[in-house]
Amino acid sequence: MRPQPSTPPAPPSPLALVRDHTVYACVMGSRAFGLATDASDTDRRGVFLAPTPLFWRFDKPPTHVEGPAEEQFSWELERFCELALRANPNILECLHSPLVEYADATGRELLDLRGAFLSRRVRETFVRYARGQHRKLAADVRTHGAPRWKHAMHLLRLLTSVRDLLRTGTLTVDVGDLREPLLAVKRGEVPWAEVEARMTRLAAEAEEAARRSPLPEEPDRRRVEDFLVRTRRASARQADPYDEVVQGVVGTGGVGQV
């Protein structure tokens, strides 16, 4: 006799996924960069692992979630890894934040994989992003007579970061002793022509560093994928309310019956 279908439990809300399944959380923005002032917000970023049974539904879990707190943003693990393999600047910096607030066993393994995501691709992605931001700043100068100085400061920080990453193979998020010179830019104390000249020089130095960089040409995609598959399998084996219907059908021999 064919088992009677039952109503699947409602999937968790996006905010519940962040609340209950976060594997890694950190602080980003000015506080992580070492550029915070009394007026700075606290920007939080995180990675959550959606339980594997949620992917067996037609409606898949979200790839990212805003909240629940203000200035908080989280990515699902697979999306986070995908973007990191593409050398997305925001993602790589998140993975290298000096202000880690939480990491479970999966999060710690993700942190151990930081080197697998780094490659010479950073030259293209970081510098391409910087060029786009530079065009916006230059447009502000033409329209308003001055750039958005905070954005100019962060662009200098980003270009310095990628130059040093290509030179050393290490991504350092905190600006260290560059704090005061960068904050002077933020306060508008450095002429735009000088700031623009610094940007041009840093971009050229990054291009030069890429030719002799210790970084590999490509990230270690196989190592990252192995981690992701193992993590998904482990999640599928865990008892979870989201897969009770699947387990019930398998237990009654319902799969494959017509």
Image (cartoon, rainbow, N blue to C red):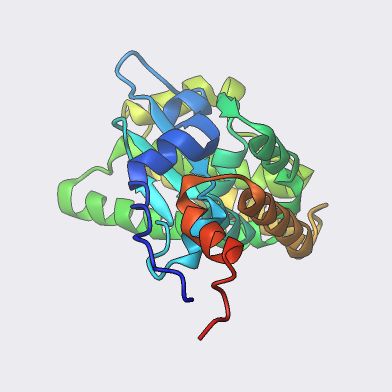
Residue 154 against residue 62 in the figure, above or below? above
Q: In this view, does 19 lie to the left or right of 164?
A: left
Residue 125, percent across and down? 55, 60
Q: Is any part of residue 126 visible from this angle?
A: no
Q: Nearer the viewer, residue 25 or 188?
A: 25
Taking the spot 63% from the left edge, 59% from the top edge, the residue there is 85
Total numbered badges shown on the rendered structure:
0
Q: Is any part of residue 64 visible from this angle?
A: yes
Residue 114 against residue 217 in the figure, above or below? above
Residue 15, percent across and down? 34, 41
Q: Is residue 198 left or right of residue 43?
A: right
Taking the spot 45% from the left edge, 59% from the top edge, the residue there is 131
Residue 138, percent across and down? 31, 54
Taking the spot 35% from the left edge, 59% from the top edge, the residue there is 135
Residue 35 against residue 257 in the figure, above or below? above
Q: In this view, does 227 lie to the left or right of 136?
A: right
Q: Residue furthest left?
A: 144
Q: Which residue lies furthest to the front in this view?
A: 1
Q: Which of 213 and 80 is in front in this view?
A: 80
Taking the spot 28% from the left edge, 41% from the top edge, the residue there is 148
Q: Which of 28 and 257 is in front in this view?
A: 257
Q: Which residue lies furthest to the bottom in this view?
A: 258
Q: For residue 133, which quarter of the picture?
A: bottom left
Residue 255, percent across and down? 56, 74
